[in-house]
Amino acid sequence: MSLDKERAQQLYAALAQTEAEIGKAVVGKPLVIRQVITAILAGGHVLMEDVPGVGKTTLAVAISRVMGMEYHRTQFTPDVMPSDVVGFCVYNRETGAKEYVPGSVMCNLYLADEINRTSSKTQSALLEVMEEGTVTVDGVTRRVPQPFIVIATQNPVGAAGTQMLPDSQLDRFMIRVSIGYPSEDQEIRMMKDRRSGNPLDDVRTVMSADDLLTLRAMVDAVTVDDRLYNYVTELVNMTRNHDMLSLGISPRGSLAVIAMAKANALICGRGYVIPEDIMNVFAVTTAHRMLLTPVARMNRVSEADVAEQVLRSVVPPRLFN
């Protein structure tokens, strides 16, 4: 994509400010913030899996404010229906026609809070929108606003009334992240910050939804050397034959790694991908796409452990002499 130098510099500056602004509300988690922003630039959706109360919703709200996006949130409970998500049609007696009533998914950033607490039918309705970018109601297909991002959360604890996402549907998310507990110093800072109000109120908007679309076009224009495509192929093929995995990375996972690497390169100010970009995003992009064997689970081996082992086993190409 061709942009004048001044416009490109403005977007790079806004991108740098984005991380700082989100950091006002989500304390001490720069890596998680960077990973989520990278996934958004790459055009993907984010699954946040963590215990309650660590800031998953706060992170989603902060992102929507900083990036100037329309934000909707649904608390997924067992009684949430697919029509609540995608919308429905009602008959208008005055016009004699059916009128579409938009569902909650008609926005730029959609927070599906505790997605594992709703029915599999409602989960499937949302995952279809994530994949296609459209909703179909009564035979009429409508596009969701662009950009469109889903940030879903699920709690790994408390099994009562939950319907965990099947492994095949986890593949629809570009990354899975865990925020984790803050350090002691960070928790003290959080408590002090709350004395005079909510830190979210201090978060500024530094870009628009149109700016994000332009940044995504810039990501698409980032170049990838053929040797890096071969590198990613070697990595994913190793997961498909790994003795600790019963299911390796799908072709959708390969595409996600490349997209994330290109977005990481853009954030670093480059118009081309280097092996370090792939290495930086590989684990967070692929761990949730793997299925461990019973032996691996018994030995407390995690998907992230396997991803790191695969990275160590494959020698990255040398692009520059």
Image: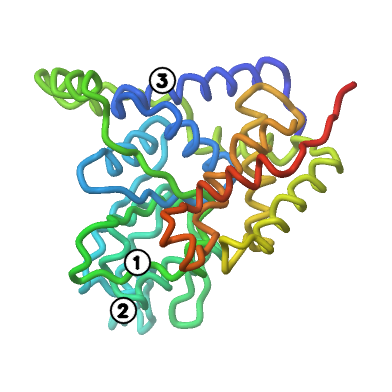
Q: Position of residue 318 (x, y in %)?
A: 84, 30
Of pointers 1 and 3, the one earlier in the residue sequence = 3
- From the image, which quarter does the N terminus lie in? top right
Q: Position of residue 208 (x, y in %)?
A: 48, 32
Quadrant location of residue 312? top right
Q: Position of residue 89 (x, y in %)?
A: 35, 77
Of pointers 2 and 1, the one earlier in the residue sequence = 1
Report which residue position mark 1 lands on.
85
Residue at image coords 43%, 32%: 33
Report which residue position mark 2 lands on.
90
Q: Amino acid at mark 2?
A: Val
Query: Residue 238 versus residue 50: which sits nearer the camera?
Result: 238
Report which residue position mark 3 lands on.
20
Q: State the SS at label 3.
A: helix
Residue 135 shown left or right of residue 196 in the figure: right
Query: Residue 287 versus residue 76: which sits nearer the camera?
Result: 287
Residue at image coords 51%, 66%: 293
Residue 295 shown left or right of residue 183 in the figure: right
The correct choice, above or below, for 317 with respect to 120 in the image is: above
Query: Residue 49 versus residue 64: which sits nearer the camera?
Result: 49
Q: State the SS at label 2.
A: strand
The span from disc 2 to disc 1 (Cα, nearest Å) is: 15 Å
Going by the picture, which residue comes out furthest to the left?
195
The answer to whether the residue labelled 1 contacts the one labelled 3, judged by CB atoms less than 8 Å apart, is no
The span from disc 1 to disc 3 (Cα, nearest Å) is: 32 Å
